[in-house]
Image (spheres, rainbow, N blue to C red):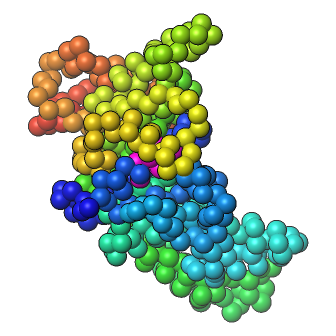
Amino acid sequence: MRPPRHLRGVRILLYSGKGGVGKTSVAAATGVQLARTGYKTLVMSVDPAHSLADSFDLGGQLFHGATGEPVLVTERLWIQEVNIQKEIKKHWQAIANYITSLLRTTGIGDVEAEEMAIFPGMEELSALMYVNQYRRSGQFDVVILDCAPTAESLRFVSLPTTLDWYMKHVFSWERKLLKAIRPVANRVAPIEMPSEKYFDNVQDLFSKIEGIDTLLEDGNITSVRLVTNAEKMVLRETQRAFVYFSLHGLTVDQVVVNRLFPAEIHDAFFGGWRENQAKVLGEIESYFAPIPVSKVPLFQSEVLGIGRLGLLADVLYADGADPAALTRTERPYTFERKDGHYQVRLHMPFAEKKEIGLFKKDDELVVELGTLRRHIGLPTSMSDLSPSGARMEGSTLVVEMRS
């Protein structure tokens, strides 16, 4: 079977959500559906607490990422759990050695120092290197990233930009300075300065992820799918994730509401839960419109193994929908700063300014268009600002935000 012709180059799907919402199961089921459709598919776990192999009920066989390489689980479907210890030996050795030596000077034991040398971001950067590698090689048609819980996912997507800024503005200056002072500094300083191997390692790492930020921000290649539950606390985190993915330039094209109580449950004990889920589901559909919201019921038993994941895929893609299809390629809104002032820019085709109303509610900007209301969560840097005016620029509504 060949994949549908609409796909050109690799397609990247990021699944993110609060811990425990069933994100890994949804990502794995999507992988099953893609493989059935004819795509060569890889599902990669970016979560340090890997559960992908468990989702496929392969824990004992895969040894939780012991190989760190893609493992074929069924026809056209591979899974991969990044093994950070193996990645350090392949890509991070000089950096890890330097950090370990620094930690040892503080009196920390060798084993503790080696463990602490695995600093935040190593796992995510390693995964980004693999994504770039697979994009260049064309080894897979679709790469699904089963991301860590929301906060770590946001760090994952911000790392390329941060590293790019460091390489352009700090790296060369820092390397030249240390090269000049290293002979003297190593004689008088309490710790040894980083060697040239350290800087070679950093430069090599950057070359392996260079361009990944452009790839992630291209809505024709990369889409984010947010997995949530119909619970108030979970919804708030999903809303924050939506804001920050948008802030980092990524396109969210689907929200999956998992574990809804099925209509056939009539037990009075669940009456309050059903009412609450219905209320929160309404808020989800209102908040994320026009992004489609998929609904998945609570299954009677745990979703484990290819068979059960296939059943979940049948529910998620009941109409035979292609998970790799492009449904949205542009972000519904963006945040900008111009001439010292902040702007929120919303894509609103066919809208006329006279129809639009604006007001602030807590940390949200509320836009009213006739009977339609859009809630836009604001990033921290803009949460204390209020709308001071608006104008149409073509099909884009520009809202000025001031203190």
- The mark total stands at 0
356 sits left or right of 340 in the view: left
Q: Is residue 29 magenta?
A: yes
Quadrant in which the C terminus appears:
top left
Q: What is the chief secondary structure element of the magenta stretch?
A: helix
Q: Is residue 153 above or below residue 79?
A: above
Residue 143: x and y in percent read 39, 60
Residue 19: x and y in percent read 59, 41
Pick whichever, 309 or 327, lies toward us.
Answer: 309
Pick whichever, 349 or 130, lies toward us.
Answer: 130
Name the outermost residue toward the top. Answer: 268
Q: Kindly indicate the quadrant of the structure image that contains residue 97.
A: bottom right
Q: Is residue 143 visible?
A: yes
Name the outermost residue toward the bottom. Answer: 183
196 sits left or right of 374 in the view: right
Quadrant in which the N terminus appears:
bottom left
Residue 47: x and y in percent read 58, 54
Name which residue lies at 54% across and 57% down: 46
Name which residue lies at 36% across and 24% down: 285
219 sits left or right of 125 in the view: left
Name which residue lies at 56% across and 29% down: 300
Name which residue lies at 34% across and 76% down: 137
Residue 133: x and y in percent read 40, 73
Q: Is residue 263 above or below residue 19?
A: above
Magenta segment: 24-31
Pick whichever, 297 or 146, lies toward us.
Answer: 297
Q: Is residue 172 magenta?
A: no
Q: Is residue 382 visible?
A: no
Q: Is residue 43 above or below residue 352?
A: below
